[in-house]
Image (cartoon, helix red, strand yellow):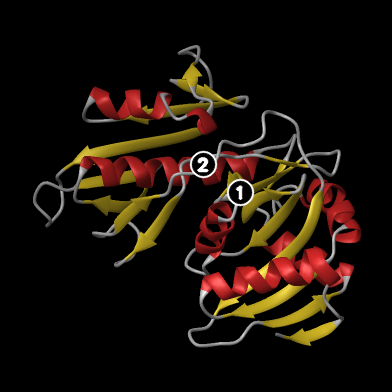
Amino acid sequence: MLESRGLSIRISVPYAALLESLLAVPELELRPAEPDRTTDLEYQVDAGGNIHAGGYQIWFGARRLAWATTRSAAERLLVSHLESKLAELARDRIFVHAGVVAWRGSALLFPGRSFTGKSTLVAEFLRRGATYFSDEFAVVGPDGLVYPYPRPLHLRRGLAFGRGEDWDPVTVKPPLPGAGIPPRAIIFSGYVPGSRLQWRALSPGRALLLLMSHALGARRHPVQALKFLSPIAAGAPAYAVRRGEVKPAVEKILRLLFHHGPNQNRSA
C-alpha cells in the first residue's frame, strides 16, 4: 500500500523493479502507507495474459487500461494514468493539462490535449533559454501563481501512446526552485502543417472556459477550479494561435509578446 497527497494507492505488480521505479518518480510523491487504510486507487499489472506474447496488461480497478509490449512502456502507462488521477483528485491546487515555461520571471502556458504540439513548443522555448516548468501540467495554486511540475520532457514520435512509440529525451534547464510565478500569457495553440502563424486575442471569459476544459479536477471540484483559475484568466492575456513549424512560430510569439505586444486580431 502506498500513499500520495493524502490518497492511499494499492499497486500489484509482477516484478519488484516496477514498484521501485514508481517510488523513484518525485512528481508522484509516493511513500509507504499504513496497510489497513481504505484504498482510494487500485492498480494491477499482469505479465502476459493476452494475444501479444510477452506483453503486460495494466488494470485500474476492474477496468483494463491498456497493454504494453515492454516493461518500460508498462511503467510509462501506469505512471501517466496515476499522475492524471492524482491531479484530478487534488484539492490544494488545480492541475491544467498544459506545457509551461518560465520566461523573464513569468510563466507562459500552452494548454492542450496530447498530440497538439505543446511539448514541441516547450522544447523550442527551452532551446532559446527559457526555464522548464512542465510539458504535462500547469499547477495553479490558490494564490494565482503557477508552480513547476518538472517531469522528464520527452518528444513523441511515431505510433500511438503505448504501442511501439519512440521517445526522445530533451535536455532541459532545471526548474525554478519551489516558488510559483505569475502567468504572462496563455496560448491555446494548434499545429496545422504549412500554416502561417495566426493570432487571435481571447476574452477573459472565453479563456476561463477553455482553461476549465483542460483542468483535470474541474468536474469533481468546479467551485474550487473556478476560484483558482479566474484570477489567471482575468490577469493574463490569452490567445488562440494556429501555427505551422515550431521555430518561426516561437520567434514570432516572442516578438509579439515581448517587443510590441499583439494586436487584438492579427495574422503574422
**Is residue 82 in sight in this rendering?**
yes
Please identify the quadrant where the C terminus is shown.
bottom right
For image coordinates 61% across by 42% down, the residue present is: 87
Q: Amino acid at mark 1?
A: Phe
Helix, strand or loop under label 2: helix
Q: Position of residue 36 (x, y in %)?
A: 49, 13
Q: Quadrant of residue 7?
A: top right
Q: Position of residue 114 (x, y in %)?
A: 50, 63
Please identify the quadrant where the N terminus is shown.
top left
Between 149 and 257, the one nearer to me in the picture: 257
Instruction: Name the residue tied to disc 2.
Output: 83
Between 49 and 251, the one nearer to me in the picture: 251
- In this image, 117 relative to 107: left or right? left
Q: Which mark is residue 228?
A: none
Give the mark nearer the N terminus: 2 vs 1.
Answer: 2
Q: Position of residue 59 (x, y in %)?
A: 34, 44
- In this image, 79 relative to 223: left or right? left
Helix, strand or loop under label 1: strand
- In this image, 198 relative to 163: left or right? right
* Vertical position of residue 20 compared to residue 124: above or below: above
- In this image, 256 relative to 71: left or right? right
Q: Amino acid at mark 2?
A: Glu
* Vertical position of residue 78 compared to residue 20: above or below: below
Q: 10 Å neighbourhood of mark 1: few (<14), some, or many (≥20)? A: many
For image coordinates 64% across by 40% down, the residue present is: 89
Instruction: Name the residue tied to disc 1.
Output: 137
> Which one is in front in this view, the residue at disc 2 or the one at disc 1?
1
Q: Are marks 2 and 1 in contact (CB under 8 Å)?
A: yes
